[in-house]
Image: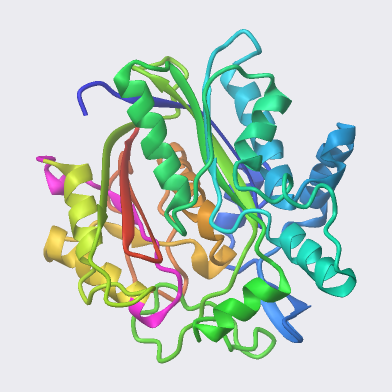
Amino acid sequence: MNNKISITAFSSISPLGNNAEEVWGKYLENQHCFTRRFLDQQETSIAALSEDSKQIIAEVRESDIKYKFLDDSVLFALGASRKAVEQAGWNSDDVFGINIGSSRGATDLFEKHYKEYIDTGKAQTLASPTTTLGNISSWIAHDLQSVGPEISHSITCSTALHALLNGVAWLKSGMADKFLVGGSEAPLTDFTIAQMRALKIYSRINQDEEPWPNLAFDFDKTQNTMILGEGAAVCCLESGEKENAIAYVTGVGYATEILEHNISISAEATCFQKSMKMALKDLDLKTVDAIVMHAPGTIKGDLTELRAIEKVFGTDLPLLTTNKWKIGHTFGASGILSLELALLMIQRDTFIGVPFGMQQNQVKSIKKVLINAVGFGGNAVSILIEKP
């Protein structure tokens, strides 16, 4: 990339908390954030927002009479966006674009509206406008009184990093100077869980009996252990080097591979190899200090990504980590929450590993981190960020 893109603010609301200090504190604890809830007709491991974070979302809902009927996926994004824009110092006079994506969108509302239609034969007046995907960015634009372009999209689990790609493209083109990008997901519903169980990828490990119900980053596991989480995260992008930059986006890569079936990925994750090489270009690979892997906790998903990293980096691997053993898979928000972990490791110069994973020791400062995400359909994205 010819000129750097600055990340000038970041905000999230997730099972880790709702501010940077709380999130970092959770990362320093070798404990997962999973609880149990009765979903899909059985007790199910999930990663949900804390009561404190739920109260913040309740306050967002109550802040405007029009927000009463919005889905949690929209409200999560509103809460995170307000804080990020405040941190960046943007106001209503600033022209900035918005691109917030979601894999599933208004899952909870859609399921409720559909059930009501099946039960009564009638649809609610707001059923359609409150469940469209474009709902998220348009409500954020309303809330922040912004006048720039609004984009919503869904590219399964790589959605949030595709939003970052879009923001970078707009900034590089000169069509915008500032962009708010991210992802939001509220998938903790009966039907969403049932869909994951139908794919046979949801964890069957009883967290009351075993310490780690999601074995993301365990490359020897014999069963799929994915668990769903909820949350949203956004970051503020600005063109050029800024004094208040948290980090710079210095490389972006993307790739799609030919599918054998709807959720397939090749044995050596060809899409990841291509996206990582594109993001890294002619960079000295030894300068990459860490990789935050997608690693959802499935047998094939984790192992194929590791094989792709080995293909690109050879035997001299950077430090490797993931956060899904801790907060589960947040679908469309997962990539941006992985970016949060990368930013925090750079800011604190501290590597956060996986407690049951292979032993890795930090021997130098963390200055460059690569973040990976991939979704159903082999849509891979890799983002390289660098310490200012």
- In this image, 33 relative to 263: left or right? right
Residue 349 in view in this figure: no
- In the image, farthest residue toward the front: 121
Residue lying at 39% horizontally and 35% vertically, measured from the top left: 166
Give the vertical position of 376 relative to 182 (above or below).
Answer: below
**Percent x, y for residue 310?**
17, 66
**Percent x, y for residue 187?**
65, 63
| Rendered image quadrant of residue 116 | bottom right
- In this image, 316 relative to 163: left or right? left
Q: Nearer the viewer, residue 34 or 281?
A: 281
Q: Quadrant of the C terminus?
A: top left
Residue 68 in view in this figure: yes
Q: Which residues are magenta?
A: 282-300
- In this image, 272 relative to 41: left or right? left
Q: Nearer the viewer, residue 347 or 151?
A: 151
**Percent x, y for residue 207?**
65, 84
Give the vertical position of 77 relative to 26 (above or below).
Answer: above
Residue lying at 73% horizontally and 43% vertically, measured from the top left: 75
Colour mode? Answer: rainbow
Residue lying at 87% horizontally and 43% vertically, measured from the top left: 68
Residue lying at 61% horizontally and 24% vertically, measured from the top left: 85
